[in-house]
Each structure stands twice: as C-alpha cells, then as structure tokens.
C-alpha cells in the first residue's frame, strides 16, 4: 500500500465521518483524487465499512463477557459460528488456537440474560463454555496503526 493510501486509511480509522474535502485537506490531495483512492481502497477490501461507536451501556447492554467455547465432540463438523450467527448478543466470534475453538464477545443487559445466552450457546452449538465477565473497559475499538509496507 502506498504512503498516501496509508495516510487516508489512518485518517478514516480515526474519524470515519470525515468529508472528502476534509480528508483531502488532511492528506494534501485534491478532493477528486481522495475520492478515487477511497473507492479503490474499498474495492480492494482495505476499507470494509464505516460504523458508529455506540455506548453499549446507553443502549441497555452494560454487561460485556468473553465466552470461550469448545465442542463436546471434536469429531463433529466445525460449524459453531454458523449455529450461533442468529444470536444478536454475540458481537464478535474469533477462531482461536489452544484448547478452545472460538472466543465470543457478548453484550447483554444483566447476569440473568448472560445465563440465558450461555444456555442458548450450549444447546445451539453443542459446546461447553467458559465465561469471563469484564468488570470495566478502559478502551476498545482502537483504530489500527497503519504500518509501512503492509498490503
């Protein structure tokens, strides 16, 4: 990835709502050149979307937990992500190395809701779970450091 593209990605990672005019001013290109580069970065899959950062507590989901899952029977198909995709409380699903197969990031309203969700996860995916509840979140969703020579 060229240095100018890295600068564009870094600026948008910090503020995805930047107008093309403001972005062009920040990186020192014309508005049309920035627009072309952003479209090219989107087509290449470098920029995959734009989202709003939401306060989970403000929308009624103050409890964050990490749920490690492991199949009861490792010889069965590895389809847990598909079996769990219908559960909106699961914000992210990561395939991991080690004893567990996946690590789920979940957001719920209360411990009772977490207990209900864990039961749904166990029965839907035929897995065991190990749960860690987050007490506080000093930071998350930090923008990536765009490195030289990547991409």
Image: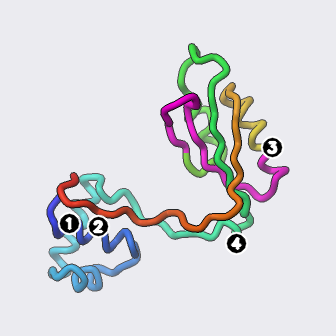
How far is disc 1 from disc 4 in space, using C-alphas? Answer: 35 Å
In the image, residue 7 sits, relative to residue 106, either above or below, namely below
Q: Give the structural element (helix, strand or loop) at label 1.
A: helix
Percent coordinates x, y for residue 56 in the rendering: 66, 66
At a point 25% along the width and 60% down the height, the residue shown is 147
CA–CA distance between discs 3 and 1? 45 Å
Numbered mark located on residue 9 in the image:
2
Residue that label 3 marks: 116
Instruction: Give how far apart the Cα atoms at labels 1 and 2 are.
Output: 6 Å
Residue 87 versus residue 4: which sits nearer the camera?
Answer: 4
Q: Secondary structure at mark 2?
A: helix
Q: Would you say residue 19 is visible in this rendering? A: yes
Task: Inspect the magenta stretch and tell me whether residue 100 lies in it.
Answer: yes
The percent position of residue 9, horizontal first and vertical second, equals 29, 67
Mark number for residue 58?
A: 4
Which of disc 4 and disc 3 is earlier in sequence?
Answer: 4
Q: CA separation, marks 3 and 4?
A: 21 Å
- Circles 1 and 4, Cβ within 8 Å, touching? The answer is no
């Amino acid at each position: 990835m060229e240095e100018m593209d890295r600068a564009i990605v870094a600026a948008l990672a910090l503020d995805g709502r930047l107008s093309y005019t403001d972005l062009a001013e920040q990186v020192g290109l014309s508005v049309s050149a920035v627009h072309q580069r952003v479209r090219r970065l989107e087509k290449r899959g470098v920029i995959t979307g734009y989202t709003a950062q939401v306060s989970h507590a403000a929308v009624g989901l103050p409890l964050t937990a990490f749920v490690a899952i492991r199949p009861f029977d490792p010889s069965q198909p590895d389809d847990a992500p598909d079996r769990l995709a219908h559960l909106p409380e699961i914000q992210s699903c990561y395939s991991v190395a080690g004893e567990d197969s996946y690590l789920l990031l979940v957001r719920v309203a209360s411990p009772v809701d977490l207990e209900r969700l864990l039961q749904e996860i166990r029965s839907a995916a035929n897995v065991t779970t190990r749960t860690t509840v987050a007490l506080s979140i000093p930071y998350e969703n930090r923008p990536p450091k765009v490195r030289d020579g990547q991409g």
